[in-house]
Amino acid sequence: MEARAIAKYVRISPLKVNFICAEIRGKQVDEALALLKFTPKRGARELYKVLHSAVANAENNLNLDRADLIVKEAYANDGPTMKRYRPKAKGMAYPILKRSSHIGVVVSEKE
């Protein structure tokens, strides 16, 4: 059995969040939550919320024991990109890409 949670349209670049996702993959959920709580990055705070939600889904909807849960998957996919432009020299326009991401976590029982 596995439970999942997804946060969509989070205004942070997926590259920044994927570094933190790699840290928690395969870890026990309480260990992963503690790691995220003390990681001083903005993406860690968003990932903490999603992981906490996935654990709550597993406990309440699937009646799984929290002690047996591990982080099976953690990912940050591309969301829509807002395109803005800045004036540059000689009348040119310079694009600024404001990226967003869809952050997902899947937790499952240990085998």
Image (cartoon, grey):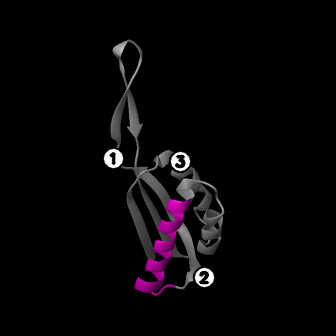
Under mark 2, the amino acid is: Ala
Q: Secondary structure at mark 1?
A: loop
Mark toward the viewer: 2 or 1: 1
Residue 5 appears left or right of 27: left
Q: Earlier in the sequence, mark 3 or mark 1?
A: 3
Residue at the disc numbered 1: 80
Residue 85 appears left or right of 28: left
Mark toward the viewer: 3 or 2: 3
Pointer 3 with pointer 1, Cβ within 8 A: no
Q: Is residue 77 above or below residue 57?
A: above
Q: Is residue 31 above or below residue 80?
A: below
In the rendering, at what x and y percent does residue 96 appear? 40, 33
Residue at the disc numbered 2: 67
Is residue 19 in view?
yes
User: Please, which residue is most extreme toward the top here?
Assistant: 90
Which quadrant holds residue 104? bottom left
Q: Is residue 57 magenta?
A: yes
Under mark 3, the amino acid is: Lys
Q: Is residue 53 magenta?
A: yes
Under mark 1, the amino acid is: Pro
Q: Residue at x 52, y 52 (%)?
A: 17
Q: Which residues are magenta?
A: 45-64
Density class for disc 1 (Cα within 10 Å; few <14, some 14-19, many ≥20) is some
